Amino acid sequence: MTHDLILTGGRVFDPASGLDRQTDVAFSDGKLAEIGEGLKGREVRDVSGSLVTPGLIDLHTHVYWGGSSLSVPPDSYAHSSAITTLVDTGSAGPGNFAGFKAHVIDRSTTRILSYLHISFAGIFAFSPTVMVGESQDMRLMATKDAVAVALANPDDIIGIKVRVGKNTSGPNGIAPLQLALIAADQCGLPVMAHIDEPSPTYEEVVNLLRPGDVLTHCYRPFPNAPVFADGTVRDGVLKGRERGVLFDIGHGMGAFSWKSARAMMAAGFPPDTISSDVHTMCINGPAWDLVRTMNKMLALGMSLDDVVTASTTAPADALRRPELGRLSAGGIGDASVIAVTDEPIELVDVLGETVVHPQRITAKGSVRAGKWINA
């Protein structure tokens, strides 16, 4: 059989099935058609020296471009980083989700899923000149509206987002999270909770989260770091993982510290998922993109296989979308191609500390719905 597209010569790694060998991957009619040797196709891409993975998933992004001040254009960002699924985390709320869907989600070649913000207007004032924490006004906490919009858009909305902390909820403290949990429970969806500086504290937030909920910015610097000054992981964090809370990187412009990350890794506490929290104020550093964030976890001692898992299969499971993050015949026609080269790269955290790692992860391209996209 002659397929539409063949990726040949690469190491194919699928964490879900355990597949790990050099072989061909074929795509036809928008689906992944076959995995095996000697496959034939009308278009053949030689990816020798590269790693073919399930489509990369960036679990924390802001891509309501044109509709929110912090968002970046989804397709240009995703294509350059070999990402096939972007998860927007609260750029839109129930009051403006219809615009996000009509003007961005439905028009993008990249798959976009959304954590709907509990705030009626989403994250509406985030820029170098205007910064207003949406959770500081309880009048915006639109519990009923969020439930109605989430239930009406099950293909697009995969959870409820909330931001709490000194900068985002201010005097309202943890109350917006409590409302987000009520809304999520009514929808049968998980919550993604942002934390910044206290209060509330890191542990107070984690203590409220349920199995399957996501705590993003999990390697925050002081204050509100997950570890004490001596590197000991906070008890509430350990209990949260035992309970099934998921811990996500969510790098962004203020939420990844080498000091916290080293302590967490030394304590045997790697992240469940790796994400960039890409937005207008961190896309040109310090976060850059998902691939750069993956590179930082490689520098911290995670194996390449674990880094890939935390960027494909694990976020798919967190999204409750088992069809994503896998390479399987008859499944979705998504894949990512990355390479790891012996080339030094400077990796900077949000506090300005730079680590030089001898290996660089590079995006080479992706397959989305069976079609090749150059990085």
Image: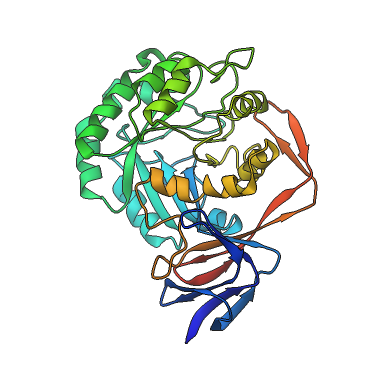
Q: Which quadrant of the structure image shows residue 332? A: bottom left
Total labels: the figure holds 0
Nearer to the camera, 347 or 36: 36
**Residue occupying image coordinates x 42% and y 15%:** 200
Does residue 294 appear left or right of residue 197 in this picture? Answer: right
Nearer to the camera, 252 or 130: 252
Does residue 28 appear left or right of residue 257 in this picture? Answer: left
**Residue occupying image coordinates x 33% and y 45%:** 158
Eyeballing the image, is 114 above or below 52? above
Q: Which quadrant of the structure image shows residue 365? A: bottom right
**Residue occupying image coordinates x 56% and y 53%:** 77
Nearer to the camera, 124 or 336: 336
Q: Where in the figure is residue 12, as x and y percent of width and height?
A: 58, 63
Eyeballing the image, is 73 above or below 239? below
Q: Where in the figure is residue 343, as x and y percent of width and height?
A: 80, 50
Residue furthest bottom in the image = 1
Residue 198 visible within the image? yes
Q: Where in the figure is residue 286, as x and y percent of width and height?
A: 65, 36
Q: Where in the figure is residue 101, as x and y percent of width and height?
A: 33, 53
